[in-house]
Image: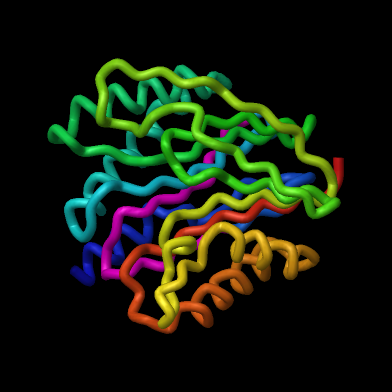
């Protein structure tokens, strides 16, 4: 298990392509030595960055192997479907469906950010809605635009689009954050996550990441039962 943990750790991004307008950071804190949560930063060329977060149905070694399969599929298809999120996720779904057992699936949020225009195009495959905290503290939820990956052979999606402006914050997260419980059986939930983003919005992305994880752990002092995964992107200038 320790070797598996070390191997899986290397699947997470080790470096982030430099961007002029977006400060990004990501983290995955696994509940077990290995897990099924996944996040990634993809260099898509032409000043574009791919941001990915996913959650494999299941736990432990089986989920970790499926996560590695999903990551390989996504990275492998990026070069084929460059600049076309709809085609990219369609190819990933096809491969994931063909190479896994019946009933296997993953939720996934994929976004493509253009560093020159500030345009964010995204596909939400049955994942929790990403949160876009605007500079005026209003919140936009980037809801599902497709069903989960790997469950159905016939699959399609629509592509959402937003423009990011200076001071905006994008947060992608897994249910290990929102479904953390305190001793009173209260869920951390989306509203507390939004409150934490607002309270700490002036921090850098890396510091904001740490503050939110600390907030979740103060709220839920129980043993961690699910992976905690979070990506934060802070728009600096346009």
Residue found at x 22% / y 67%: 3
- Between 127 and 209, the residue placed more toward the observer is 127
Q: Check if residue 14 falls in the magenta segment.
A: no
Q: Is residue 15 left or right of residue 226?
A: right
Say whether residue 82 is left or right of residue 120.
Answer: left
Q: Quadrant of the N terminus?
A: bottom left
Magenta: main secondary structure equals strand
Is residue 178 rendered to the left or right of residue 106? right
At a point 23% along the width and 27% down the height, the residue shown is: 97
Residue 178 vs residue 64, the one in the foreground: 178
**Residue 220 rendering spot, x and y as whole percentages:** 45, 78
Residue 205, quarter of the rendered image: bottom right
Percent position of residue 152, x then y: 26, 24
- Name above or below for residue 4 compared with residue 20: below
Left or right position of 112 against 164: left
Residue 138: image x %, image y %? Answer: 77, 49
How many discs appear?
A: 0
- Residue beneath the point at 69% across and 42% down: 140
Q: Is residue 199 above or below residue 184?
A: above
Please, which residue is most extreme toward the left here? 101
Is residue 43 within the magenta segment? yes
Which part of the image, by quadrant, shows the C terminus? top right
Horizontal and vertical percent for residue 31?
32, 69
Q: Which residues are magenta?
A: 26-45
């Amino acid at each position: 298990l320790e070797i598996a943990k070390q191997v899986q750790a290397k699947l997470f991004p080790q470096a982030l392509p430099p961007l002029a307008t977006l400060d990004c950071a990501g983290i995955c804190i696994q509940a077990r030595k290995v897990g099924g949560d996944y996040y990634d930063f993809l260099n898509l060329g032409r000043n574009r960055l791919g941001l990915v977060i996913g959650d494999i149905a299941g736990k432990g070694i089986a989920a970790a192997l499926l996560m590695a399969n999903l990551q390989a599929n996504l990275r492998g298809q990026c070069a084929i479907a460059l600049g076309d999120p709809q085609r990219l996720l369609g190819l990933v779904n096809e491969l994931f469906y063909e190479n896994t057992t019946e009933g296997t699936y993953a939720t996934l949020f994929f976004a493509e950010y253009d560093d020159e225009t500030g345009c964010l195009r995204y596909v939400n495959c049955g994942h929790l809605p990403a949160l876009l905290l605007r500079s005026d503290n209003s919140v936009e939820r980037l809801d599902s635009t497709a069903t989960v990956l790997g469950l159905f052979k016939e699959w399609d999606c629509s592509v959402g689009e937003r423009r990011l402006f200076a001071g905006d914050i994008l947060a992608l997260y897994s249910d290990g954050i929102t479904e953390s419980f305190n001793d009173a059986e209260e869920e951390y939930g989306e509203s507390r996550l939004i409150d934490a983003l607002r309270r700490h919005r002036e921090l850098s992305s890396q510091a904001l990441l740490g503050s939110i994880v600390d907030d979740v752990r103060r709220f839920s002092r129980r043993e961690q039962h699910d992976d905690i995964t979070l990506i934060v992107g802070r728009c600096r200038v346009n």
